[in-house]
Image (cartoon, rainbow, N blue to C red):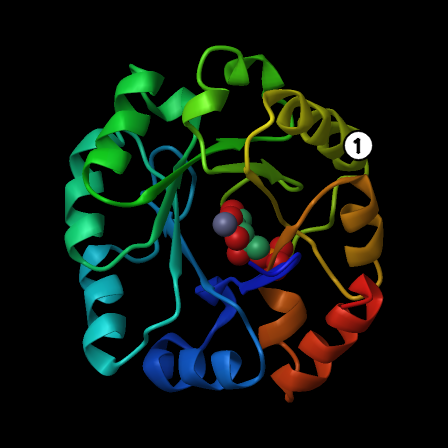
Amino acid sequence: EQKYLIAPSILSADFAKLGEDVDKVLAAGADLVHFDVMDNHYVPNLTIGPMVCKALRDYGVTAPIDVHLMVKPVDSIIPLFAEAGASIITFHPEASEHIDRTIQLIKDHGCKAGLVFNPATSLSYLDHVIDKLDTILLMSVNPGFGGQSFIPHTLEKLAQAKQRISESGRDIRLEVDGGIKVDNIAAAAEAGADMFVAGSAIFNQPDYKVVIDQMREQLGS
Ligand code: DX5
Ligand code: ZN
């Protein structure tokens, strides 16, 4: 597997031409598609659901789809996303009544499972479940909107999460999401991140390949 993965967040894509835009970003060198699901309850915004994920699969998207659930409650939507073609499903511990059960539910449906930490959420949620996780996602902004600024304290937290992953001895991806740009991606990698979500930094530029190439250059890969 590749050392570093770039996951464009389609929150900043053109929703009126979503299939085309996703094809474009994958052709530009993206590794997977980051799919932000917001419910106007857990976060103050409303986006897309399983039908749109299924539509992308039907359109011909074969890249992994990384579904970031910002919804509460979370369990009922998991089977629908698995059926719709999700590859990875991540959720926020605050949105689940029973975190271990939610992780198991994701895995029982054949997807990789991840836990998402808001900027003020303690990594202690990892304590009894880290052995079951495929991904740990640290939010570097408060969830709900694209285009916000990277919160610098995330770097310290990434290093702590990286340490937890090393101690576990397991192969767990460390994903960072929010405000990632060409000029801070190297710092996030240095702190331990190996999977980078970027929405506005990629989709707000006319040539996605230029940005993705610059990001890879920063990552030295
Ligand atoms: C925020 C979402 C992010 C967002 C990132 O709640 O989880 O994935 O789209 O967008 P940028 O890269 O613009 O901060
Ligand atoms: Zn996200």
Quadrant, the C terminus? bottom right
Residue 116 sits above or below residue 195 on the image: above
Vertical position of residue 167 compared to residue 213: above or below = above
Give the image location of residue 132, x and y in percent. 41, 26
Q: x and y percent of residue 28 in the render?
A: 57, 84
Residue 48 in the image, given as x and y percentages of width and height: 30, 58
Seen in the image, is 120 located left or right of residue 221?
left
Residue at figure coordinates x 27%, y 73% from the top left: 56
Residue tagged 1: 153
Looking at the image, residue 27 sits to the left or right of residue 182; the answer is left
Horizontal and vertical percent for residue 98? 29, 15
Q: Is residue 122 visible?
A: no
Q: Residue at x 66, y 20 (%)?
A: 167
Q: Quadrant of residue 208?
A: bottom right
The answer to which image quadrant residue 2 occupies is bottom right
For the residue labelled by badge 1, is the local secondary structure a helix, a strand or a loop?
Answer: loop
Q: Is mark 1 within 8 Å of ligand 1?
A: no
